Amino acid sequence: MTYKITSECISCYLCQPVCPNGAIKLFNNRFWIDPHLCTNCSGSVNTVPQCQASCPTSHGCVQESTDYWESWFTTYNRFITKLRKKQDYWEKWFNFYSQKFSEKLEQRSSAK
């Protein structure tokens, strides 16, 4: 399984010189990883893929899945994790609008 450069890449040029196989190429001002040259840095002195280790963003260089469903569930789980981190946002939103709704109901009942 090879790695790929995602849209979260900030073009910092940190991954290109550390790739031991020279698999990271620049084409039309965008980086991409040649899947024929990428070996996940296995068989080298590196224990982790160097493109991922040198990336300053968390998802600029990720392992490319060849299985459609594995890729789908990975993306799904990443979005769910982001939504769970914003739990306080949803609670504040719910409390604010439920309070406004309650106020409107009280206004209607007192107007009758």
Image: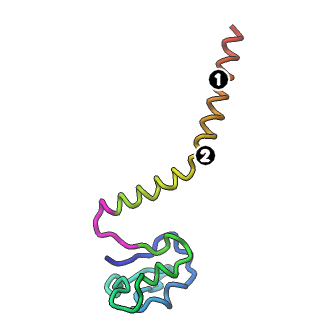
Mark nearest the camera among 1 and 2 is: 2
Residue 89 as seen in the image, left or right of residue 6: right
Left or right placement of residue 5 versus residue 91 in this view = left
CA gap between label 1 and label 2 equals 21 Å
Question: Number of numbered discs present?
Answer: 2
Residue positioned 46% across, 52% down in the render: 80
Residue hosting label 2:
88
Q: Nearer the viewer, residue 73 or 9?
A: 73
Q: Is residue 65 magenta?
A: yes
Residue type marked 2: Asp
Image quarter in which the N terminus is found:
bottom left
- Can you tell which mark lies on residue 102? 1
Q: Quadrant of residue 66?
A: bottom left
| Residue 34 falls in image quadrant | bottom left
Residue extending farthest to the top is 112
Packing grade of label 1 (10 A; few <14, some 14-19, many >=20) is few
Residues shaded magenta: 63-70
Residue under the point 40% across and 87% down: 23
- Quick one: which residue is furthest to the left in this view? 67
**Which quadrant: the C terminus?**
top right
Q: Residues within 10 Å of mark 2 (few under 14, many from 20)?
A: few
